[in-house]
């Protein structure tokens, strides 16, 4: 089990330092799931063992590896399309340059070619040829001629009729005074995430959560613990009893939960 953990650390280091994909087995993702399942079973049997901490670290490392590989594969697909599909230079042409990334697993290979198809369809939709065809297919609106109006001659009333008719006083229209709208009361952003603040900007709860998770705290270590990778992607440790260390709060909580340390204020 410890051997596969070291394998994860090796792949993590290569993904960080190299621009290309690290070489892994074709069953790499299945092996990760099997390894994590085994750690979960051991952690359930002995909640106070180091397995719980190792499980958390393995999940963090595996997630980072997956996200870094996804980013590299996506960038490779975009670059390949840029080289292969010519836009706005006469008639668009698609001539796929075979620059498929090396060391893809079967799952990643399927992901890569699905990106190629999606980008190819997108470029086809915005190409000059596609846009010109759409303009030709638009139906022309029929021209509506204005109706001819018959001219009528107004006959003025006789002067005797004008004198006999009583003069009516014009009614004065009452106009409503439009009051300015009351100022909209301030809305608590915590109650309504879609509300605007005073600067008419959305309140970024995600940034607030990330800042809280990566907040550094000081901790007194009780037991001997090996090195760990923090949520800020930095390596902390190894730890010895009575050590005073500073690390992210979300990682320190693992120590608190397993009674391996406690927070101290300096």
Image (cartoon, helix red, strand yellow):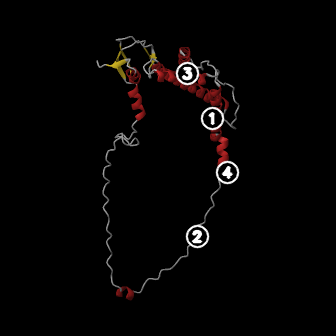
Element under label 4?
Answer: helix
Q: Compared to 108, does 185 lie above or below?
A: below
Q: Nearer the viewer, residue 145 or 243?
A: 243
Q: Residue at x 68, y 37 (%)?
A: 92
Please state the horizontal and vertical placement of residue 248, each as a whole percent of the image. Answer: 39, 22
Q: CA distance from mark 3 to mark 1?
A: 35 Å
> Mark 1 or mark 2, which is nearer the start of the sequence?
1
Q: Are marks 3 and 2 in contact (CB under 8 Å)?
A: no
Q: Compared to 151, does 90 lie above or below?
A: above
> Mark 3 or mark 4, which is nearer the start of the sequence?
3
Q: CA distance from mark 4 to mark 3?
A: 57 Å
Residue behind mark 3: 35
Residue behind mark 1: 119
Q: CA distance from mark 4 to mark 2?
A: 30 Å
**Residue lying farthest to the front in this orientation:** 45
Which image quadrant: the N terminus? top right
Residue behind mark 2: 147
Residue behind mark 4: 137
> Mark 4 or mark 1, which is nearer the start of the sequence?
1
Camera sees residue 27: yes
From the viewer's perspective, is the residue at label 2 or at label 1 nearer? 1
């Amino acid at each position: 089990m410890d051997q596969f953990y070291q394998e994860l650390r090796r792949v993590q280091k290569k993904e960080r330092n190299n621009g290309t994909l690290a070489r892994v087995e074709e069953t790499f993702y299945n092996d990760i799931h099997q390894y994590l399942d085994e750690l979960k079973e051991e952690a359930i049997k002995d909640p106070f063992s180091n397995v719980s901490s190792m499980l958390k670290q393995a999940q963090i490392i595996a997630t980072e590896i997956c996200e870094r590989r996804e980013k590299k594969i996506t960038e490779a697909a975009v670059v390949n399309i840029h080289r292969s599909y010519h836009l706005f230079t006469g008639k668009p042409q698609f001539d796929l340059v075979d620059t498929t990334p090396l060391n893809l697993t079967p799952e990643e290979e399927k992901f890569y070619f699905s990106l190629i198809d999606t980008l190819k369809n997108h470029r086809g939709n915005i190409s000059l040829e596609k846009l010109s065809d759409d303009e030709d297919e638009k139906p022309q609106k029929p021209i509506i001629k204005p109706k001819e109006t018959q001219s009528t001659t107004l006959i003025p009333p006789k002067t005797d009729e004008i004198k006999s008719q009583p003069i009516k006083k014009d009614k004065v229209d009452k106009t409503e005074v439009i009051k300015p709208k009351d100022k909209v009361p301030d809305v608590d952003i915590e109650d309504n995430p879609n509300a605007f603040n005073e600067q008419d900007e959305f309140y970024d709860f995600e940034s607030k959560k990330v800042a809280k998770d990566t907040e550094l705290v000081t901790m007194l270590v009780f037991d001997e613990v090996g090195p760990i990778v923090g949520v800020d992607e930095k390596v902390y440790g190894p730890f010895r009893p009575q050590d005073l260390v500073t690390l992210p709060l979300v990682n320190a909580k693992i120590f608190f939960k397993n009674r391996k340390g406690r927070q101290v204020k300096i």
